[in-house]
Image (tube, rainbow, N blue to C red):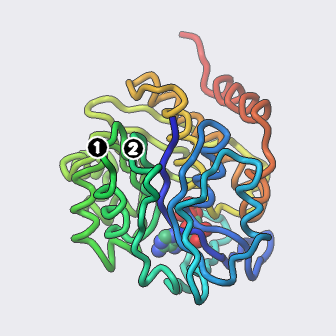
């Protein structure tokens, strides 16, 4: 079973207390696809410009990532630049250049249209919607990630697509912005009424929480002595989370709880190096070993 992913494939400029990179491959779909590819085959839908070359494309080589849905167009790729606060809990977006994304109309290759598992990574909500509209039949599980940029510029479209989503993955400040509520339990309840039955609220180094009806599950973040670059942690979390669900072939509470841990595992790897440097070089054994560390981290007897 494959996981269909739509989102940005981008160039990023990132500044953290540990250094600065002026230009590197990034994008929500890139992180999510690489992370998910350790669990399940991926079908990628995105757009890149002329500045995206074989060098960048090498990230997908040797992985079960089908890139027939990655369109190449004239002009530059999507570009994002951000700076992290000294404690890395906050980041400021310095620049967002939509470039080729501004006119992108995703066309799903015919062999993608039977996809049953879909991850709508961060991209314009109208594009997320268009991908859902092109599926041959109602998908089994649709998850969505978004950010404040789209809440500020395309809130109506976002609310429309949310009605067709099962799982929303969102960070705490975005959950507060979307719901208009500060308390995250209240916020999750309000968001659940917008469509997604399950809401995963990510809180960086404080871990993430799954709200599913009255069911709540908390996954810690891995305590790391050094976080180099938090960029892409959320997307890697989502890739691990969805990848684990597709691999399990079910999405009951037990599968969702396990997926939360695999999300945390992939997010924890992502932040160890700049950009995709860490998650592009993992082995299944390393992923399994870290999942076991997580189990140890939260185990206790009563
Ligand atoms: P994350 O740190 O998980 O929130 O994701 C960071 C990635 O999201 C970067 O690699 C950016 O290229 C990408 N990104 C930043 N802003 C946007 C946006 N408005 N829409 C889609 N992707 C974005």
Q: Is residue 90 visible?
A: no
Residue that appears at 44% across and 41% down: 209
Give the x, y percent position of residue 137. Answer: 28, 43
Identify whether 280 is placed above or below 231.
above
Judged from this view, the residue extending furthest toward the front is 110
- Sequence-wise first label, 1 or 2: 2
Mark 1–mark 2 distance (CA, rounded to whole Å) = 7 Å
Q: Nearer the viewer, residue 131 or 301?
A: 131
Q: Nearer the viewer, residue 168 or 201?
A: 168
In the image, taking residue 106 as reference, residue 268 lies left or right, namely: right
Q: Which residue is mark 2?
A: 114
How far from the left and from the top, in percent, is residue 238? 52, 48
The circle drawn on residue 137 is: 1
- Image quadrant in which you'd find residue 162: bottom left
The reply to whether residue 293 is visible in this rendering is yes
Q: Which residue corresponds to the image point at 73% horizontal and 80% vertical from the top-left?
A: 23
């Amino acid at each position: 079973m494959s996981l269909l992913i739509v989102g940005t494939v981008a160039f990023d400029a990132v500044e953290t207390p540990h250094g600065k990179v002026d230009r590197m491959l990034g994008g929500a779909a890139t992180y999510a696809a690489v992370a998910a590819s350790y669990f399940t085959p991926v079908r990628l839908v995105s757009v890149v410009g002329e500045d995206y070359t074989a060098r960048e494309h090498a990230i997908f080589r040797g992985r079960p990532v089908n890139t027939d849905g990655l369109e190449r167009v004239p002009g530059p790729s999507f570009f994002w630049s951000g700076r992290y606060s000294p404690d890395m809990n906050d980041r400021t977006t310095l620049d967002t250049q939509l470039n080729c994304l501004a006119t992108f109309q995703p066309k799903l290759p015919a062999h993608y249209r039977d996809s049953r598992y879909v991850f709508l990574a961060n991209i314009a909500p109208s594009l997320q919607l268009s991908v859902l509209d092109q599926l041959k039949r109602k998908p089994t599980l649709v998850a969505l990630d978004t950010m404040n940029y789209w809440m500020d510029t395309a809130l109506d479209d976002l609310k429309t697509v949310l009605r067709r989503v099962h799982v929303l993955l969102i960070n705490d400040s975005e959950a507060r912005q979307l719901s208009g509520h500060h308390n995250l339990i209240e916020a999750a309840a309000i968001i659940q009424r917008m469509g997604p039955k399950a809401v995963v609220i990510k809180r960086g180094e404080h871990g993430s929480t799954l709200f599913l009806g009255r069911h709540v599950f908390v996954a810690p973040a891995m305590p790391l002595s050094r976080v180099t670059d938090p960029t892409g942690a959320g997307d890697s979390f989502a890739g691990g989370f969805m990848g684990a669900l597709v691999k399990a072939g079910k999405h009951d509470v037990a599968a969702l709880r396990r997926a939360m841990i695999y999300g945390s595992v992939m997010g924890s790897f992502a932040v160890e190096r700049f950009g995709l440097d860490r998650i592009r070089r993992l082995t299944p054994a390393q992923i399994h070993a870290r999942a076991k560390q997580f189990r140890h981290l939260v185990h206790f007897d009563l």
